[in-house]
Amino acid sequence: MATMDEPLYPIAVLIDELKNDDIQLRLNSIRRLSTIARALGEERTRKELIPFLSENNDDDDEVLLAMAEELGGFIPYVGGVEHAHVLLPPLETLCTVEETCVRDKAVESLCRVGSQMRESDLVDSFIPLVKRLAAGEWFTARVSACGLFHVAYLSAPDMLRTELRSIYSQLCQDDMPMVRRAAATNLGKFAATVEPTHLKTDIVSMFEDLTQDDQDSVRLLAVEGCAALGKLLEPQDCVAHILPVIVNFSQDKSWRVRYMVANQLYELCEAVGLESTRMDLVPAYVRLLRDNEAEVRIAAAGKVTKFCRIVNPELALQHILPCVKELSSDSSQHVRSSLASVIMGMAPVLGKDATIEQLLPIFLSLLKDEFPDVRLNIISKLDQVNQVIGIDLLSQSLLPAIVELAEDRHWRVRLAIIEYMPLLASQLGIGFFDEKLGALCMQWLQDKVYSIRDAAANNLKRLAEEFGPEWAMQHIIPQVLEMVKNPHYLYRMTVLQAISLLAPVLGAEITCSTLLPVIVNASKDRVPNIKFNVAKVLQAMIPIVDQSVVDKTVRPALVDLTEDPDVDVRFYAIQALNSMDNVMMST
Amino acid sequence: MTLIHASNSPAVSPPLEWKLSQVFGDKLPGEDVHDVDVISAIDFDQSGDHIAVGDGGGRVIIFEKTGGKDDFGDLSQSSRFHLEKLDGAIPDFPKYHYKTEFQSHAPEFDSLKSIDIGEKINKVRWCAAPNRSLSILSANDKTIKLWKVMEQKNHTLKGIKLSQSIISENALLAEKSFNDGETPDPFDAHSPELTRNTENEASSSDDGNCDIVYLEDSSVSRCRRVYAHAHEFSINAISVNSDWETFLSSDDLRINLWNVEVSNQCFNIIDMKPAVMEDLVEVITGAEFHPSHCNVLAYSSSRGFIRIVDLRKSALCDHSATILKDLTHGPKSFFTEIINSITDMKFANDGRHFISRDFMNLKLWDMHMNAGPVAIYKIHESLRPKLSDLYDNDTIFDKFECCLSRDKLTFATGSYSNQVRVFSYGSGNEAGVTIDATTNTNRKPYARTTTRARRRPSLGNLARGIYRQGHDNHSTGITETASASSYDVNSKLLHLAWHPSTNLIAFAAGNRLLTYHA
């Protein structure tokens, strides 16, 4: 009996906590619902746990969300697919709560359960549930219903299919805009399950209704459905039904709708085929690139590369590139920034000649942009252009931009450019880097802002990895070690930080011969902060250097520090010594 | 009363006859009205089944239509309702009873700016009801909150339990306990207890989550979202969009657009703040979405302008507005600017007209006519000689609201001496009807015998529902002309709302809520 108690007791606690006052405990229990179910067994899960959960529908949203999620994977615990239908009632209730994320999760779980159910069960219990929700008094139920049709439709017999389609079409015309929004959102998924014959008639007419909705919020969700629906239809039907809609949308009165079109347009190019793209979509896209509203231009500019990849280079050169040129001097910095983040990707699409001739001037003007984000976006994608035109052409204009960013007033900008240094180094090559950027990397070590100094030290490490220890010995170490004489203790600390990062990269030999003496020297610093950092660095050196060096150099230095008047220094020195002993014990 | 418009409709319908329907929150003799009890906001929900009232103490009180589908309790109430119906004296006008209340906002101190933030509710607005619960937005000067009001757990649970066939098994299980190791069967000994104990439930109410307010009545209120830190100045309006997805909040200089689901970010759509505050010439006094066009928004300013903005045109709406202004000002004086400031505006349901209120007048506008208002109804012309007195005691800054009926162009607005003026466009009766809401006449108080403990002594007034039936023969003095000479600035009637479908107005006189029907 005692052995039985052991595993059961925690279960009892879990079950008890399902009713606990503390939400955290309830949440814990709900997250381990499967454990509870396994312990209860299939039958009791069906007869007790699930009904209990069905009642428990006015709990905190967080608990309901967890419950909705758990129930989605609950089929094994209620006795397999033949009993899956018992999961529907609690999920149905969750489909009507006011919190959207709970409803969404409940719908998702219903779909999971529904897609595993036997066909007969679907007809007997799942489809009636969908119909109940769709006829629900409150909009929440009807909203949830929209997300279930695609599961219900596949296994429904013909009669029911007709009914389901007509119910969906009613939902598309619901009084409440949130229901129409849900219908628009799910139309693509539903359409994917509908037979091609009905697709052309029923679904397309629902789609057309939605595209003429008064509410902007409904129309812009209909835009999202365009691409999905377009891919389902035959190209000629797509051209006949979807293309006019999207062209209309691209001139919609609402900038939010046009914004959506700008985001989605490239996806539709494939669906309508090349000819229609050339005739209709390219002009529409060009209009969007020249839209009055900056938000629309931001979206359109952000998709310029993707769009160019789909249409052929000739069209891109002829129609898109002139707009890109205009955008590069757009009045909104956000438009320029959005363009800068993708424009590098156009280089491979256009090929070398066009890139040098047309794109390069745009790169260069963006590199000189007054807004740092624009310049950063260009620099971050440098590798893409490099492959096409080579660094030589770029380097001349690149360098001033980099130097300017490196000395930018805003430390976040400096931080961002430091992050790109290793990338730049690999693209530019050793020679160029040494000549132009090496000094910058050292300069950052003495920045006024800690984050920059910290990033600079890290940057040195990454450069050492890139170019190897020998290069580091020549170009980094002397300068870094020189700085240890800096009168300001914060800068000396940066040196220690850099050393501790560089040591693992440079290896035992260089560490012992060059770095270690400097560290040991620093242990005699007058500032306690330096000294306890020395203790920390020494601790980090232990695994890198040989045991003999540890005994000869590291240990005496640490022992000295344990007699320091400052309590922190003693603390870290003792900590380092202890870890040294531990390492020895284990070896 | 002079009118701008040419009143040429010969078929003059007789003016509505307004009758007192209900009074909530009457004072007992000798009771003082505290500032915290003064009603500061009123709104009807879509169906008209509920009224939400905000007060100076940061509370939101909800009244529910008696005999509505959500009403289960209070048999005496509904039987009286039946009697009244049988009586045949009044047609089917909705009656309301106190449903619940909750503390929406509490006084705060902004330690960065060293200012006190009062708890007074500036606006309440209903959201679409997602299920059996109700959804309400309430705002004080800085923060907007979304509240959910639902029937309390115990009640719903009982209902569910009875309908479950599993109940017997659950009950069996419930009798077993865990700590009893001596029961022969180990499995049964550890039968988890799954039934909910309703007593536990009640005690679990105070589960440390301070957002949940449990009251003695059967409703629970829970704060679902807090939309904070977006307003530097005092919020003067919130308005829910017809897409039921977004709402706006406006303060003196900015209007922000929120998604109801997202409380951590909002979009600034209008910013009137000049680079240098010395250049400030006008402030926003209110804003409202169009009742059916989701993209149209109107906001009013202290200069008496109304700007209509199309959100479709651009993301920032500072510059793309149609301005409607009334250029026919009377003689300029020191007070002109103050009395021109628009204190409230509301769209008519036809989507084309709207009304605005300033200190002196109620104006009817047509969106298609920006040359001036369609009609001007003078409310406080008699006060014009006394403006300097009113300025001295700050009364001139009183913010009177206005409201209009859903089906036709009939509007109401408040005044001093607890008076409400009702006008009908094209009715021929330009003077309108004055309702005198002074309720010092012979009344029949019906103190409801509830055992509710009163949380704060003064608050009971509203809840207790001292109650007067609509058809008793009191003399509420519905007069055809306002008494011009006497006005009582201490009994001003600022806030009022029109029932969405019938001719019923709810208004706040001090701490009392009154409903009138016609």
Image (cartoon, coloured by chain):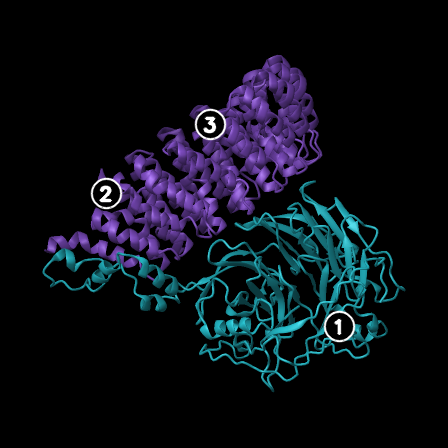
Chain colours: A purple, B cyan
**CA neighbours of label 2 inside 10 A, class few (<14), some (14 to 19), many (20+):** some
**Residue B73: mark in rendering:** none
**Residue B122 at least partly seen:** yes
Tell which of B11 and A24 is nearer to you: B11
Q: Is residue A506 above or below residue B27?
A: above
Residues beneath discs 2 and 1 located on the same chain: no
Relative to B135, B242 lies left or right:
right
Mark 1 residue element: loop
Q: Secondary structure at mark 2?
A: loop
Q: Looking at the image, which residue is at 77% across and 63% down?
A: B358
Would residue A390 be seen by someone viewing this image from the given angle? no
Q: Which residue is mark 1?
A: B394
Disc 2 vs disc 1: which is toward the camera? 2
Q: Amino acid at mark 1?
A: Asp
Element assignment for label 3: helix
User: Amino acid type of disc 2?
Assistant: Gly
Residue designated by label 2: A79
Q: Which mark is residue A472?
A: 3
At 64% from the left and 22% from the top, the residue drawn is A280
Q: Residue at x 51, y 31 (%)?
A: A202
Residue nearest the observer in this picture, A455 or A288:
A288
Whichever of callouts 2 and 3 sits on the residue coming sooner in the sequence is 2
